[in-house]
Image (cartoon, helix red, strand yellow):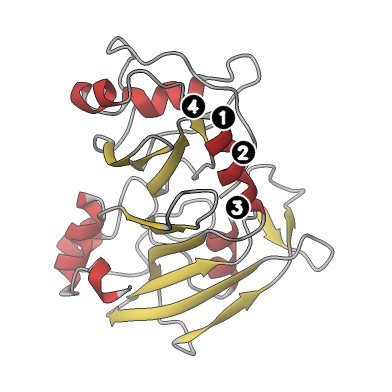
Amino acid sequence: MSTRRPRPSRQLASAIPPAPATEPARLLHLDDAVAAVAKPAGLSLATPQRDPGAAVARLLGALSAADRTRLTGSEPHLVHRLDVGTSGVVLLARTADAHRGLVAAFGERRVAKTYLALVWGHPRPREGRFDAALGPDHEDRRRMRVDAAGRHAATRYRVVAVAPHVALVELAPETGRTHQIRVHLAHAGHPVVGDDLYGGPRHHGIRDVELRDALAPPHTFLHAWRLTLPAPPLATALAIVAPLPNAFVAALVALGLEIPSASDHP
């Protein structure tokens, strides 16, 4: 996640074109200060300089008309971003004060972030911490890489469940570098399933056709599952959970793995 400050978008009308996403976005939480949206995989939050409101417009355009109507009357600011292939919780501040406070909370690492990823292989040990600095990959501008001269990056992880070929892993990034979780996992030899940029071979030798299909998603199986926001800047602390996308759930079912419950992680 990053905390670059975009300008607000005024495009809240139902005429916003739908975004090219794997499934609809949905409103998870709404109050006077903040809105939380479940971003689908495939929806880009890139913000070109020529159109600073584009990311917010795409996110709102992926919501149902009813959800957009609930946001009428505010000019939401994007607080942070997720990679285009990553699904999960995205925050919109509804006031300038809320935006300043939330951006500061992210920058000060007072926001607790929990991701779920389906990865190739079985990480050992089952619980630990990736602590490797990251920098740009000068041979491929799309990528980041582990670089001792790069910026400090740390990610805590815990293996939730294992199945043949893969593991379900819970991750808590302590820093917010570009592609941090994906690079840390790939460097450890456990790239995220569906990550064509860092993941190597698509099927990893799986012969069962149904399982191969379940483990060949159009986007990465990396999901921003839970955000816990502090008080201040909010009046009270707030925990927001985004349900797993349909394709992620289908893969877990095909593997015989239990669907994680937010109630298991207070």
Amino acid under label 4? Ala
Amino acid under label 2? Arg
Amino acid under label 3? Ala
- The relative height of residue 50 versus residue 131 in the rendered view (above or below) is above
- The relative height of residue 244 versus residue 184 in the rendered view (above or below) is above
Q: Is residue 162 left or right of residue 230?
A: left
Question: Alpha-carbon distance for marks 4 and 2?
Answer: 18 Å
Residue 99: x and y in percent read: 56, 36
- Residue 105's label in the rendered image is 3
Of residues 216 and 236, which is closer to you in this image? 236
* Pointer 3 or 4: first along the chain: 4
Q: Nearer the viewer, mark 1 or mark 4?
A: 1
Residue drawn at x 49%, y 18% is 9
Q: Is residue 195 left or right of residue 136?
A: left
- Residue 96's label in the rendered image is 1
State if disc 1 and disc 3 touch (CB < 8 Å). Answer: no
Say if residue 220 shows up in the picture.
Answer: yes
**Residue extending furthest toward the right:** 149
In which quarter of the view is residue 26 placed? top left
Of residues 66 and 181, which is closer to you in this image? 66
Number of other residues with Cα within 10 Å of mark 3, as a class: few under 14, some 14 to 19, many 20 or more: some
State if disc 1 and disc 2 touch (CB < 8 Å). Answer: yes
Q: How many marks?
A: 4
* Pointer 4 or 2: first along the chain: 4
Q: Is residue 109 left or right of residue 195?
A: right
* Pointer 3 or 1: first along the chain: 1
- The relative height of residue 32 versus residue 246 in the rendered view (above or below) is above
